[in-house]
Image (cartoon, rainbow, N blue to C red):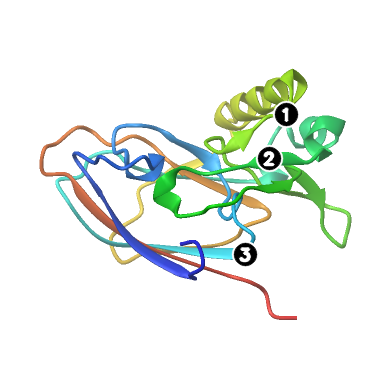
Amino acid sequence: MTGKYYARFSVKHQDSSDSYLRKAYTNLDLHTDGTFVKEKTDWIIMTKMEEQNVGGGDSVILHLDDWEHLEDLSNDPVGQENFVWGSPKSKNVDYKVEHPVFSKDRDGKPTISYIDQFPEPKNMKQGLFLQKLSDALEESKNKVVFPLPVGSTIFSNNYFWLHGRKPFIEHSGLSRELLRIRGTFFS
């Protein structure tokens, strides 16, 4: 979606892309969108357009306010350092960005900008923080896991809601098509 505000894409049984999003049988860990691009992503809309021969692949969401480890990790000084974020060739981004994992909104509440696939830690301290963060998100007992019916949409604030996907059950005819739209709040 780099340079665009929408993308329509498919997840199939086999895919040669370097994108984790298209890897049907891999857990897509909790993350936010827009982590590795210059464009601001305040909100995202995720719509399931169609699917065939699908088992598994449930949606996973977590709000920061419900996360057991928010206070500990959002107040860790390492999480407020600038991290380098890159991306694979499939994303068509020829630059890297720097920003912290955790920031504060205008009311002083923590916000997050994170995806486990694209950070380039500057040192061991940052690498260990990222591992601790990933483990703490994935082990959360407050994640909401649910099947999203075809034609249904999730609208989320990208600073407070993380999203992911459980692996699919293997099927040679697996096909799911998704529409993703992102944008900024008008002010």
Q: Nearer the viewer, residue 35 or 122?
A: 122
Q: Nearer the viewer, residue 74 or 118?
A: 118
Horizontal and vertical percent position of residue 99 = 74, 47
Q: Nearer the viewer, residue 58 or 141?
A: 58
Q: Secondary structure at mark 2?
A: strand
CB under 8 Å between callouts 1 and 2?
yes
- Label 2 packing within 10 angstroms: few (<14), some (14-19), many (20+): some
CB under 8 Å between callouts 3 and 2?
no
Horizontal and vertical percent position of residue 136 = 64, 27
- Report whether residue 76 is seen: no
Q: Which residue is mark 2?
A: 84
The amino acid type of the residue labelled 1 equals Lys
Determine the CA span between mark 1 and mark 2: 7 Å
Asked if residue 167 lies left or right of residue 83, the reply is: left
Q: Which residue is mark 3?
A: 39
Q: Is residue 170 above or below residue 94?
A: above
Say whether disc 3 or disc 2 marks the residue closer to the N-terminus. Answer: 3
Q: Which residue is mark 1?
A: 122
The amino acid type of the residue labelled 3 equals Glu
Q: Residue 66: name its quadrant.
A: top right
Residue lying at 24% horizontally and 41% vertically, measured from the top left: 15
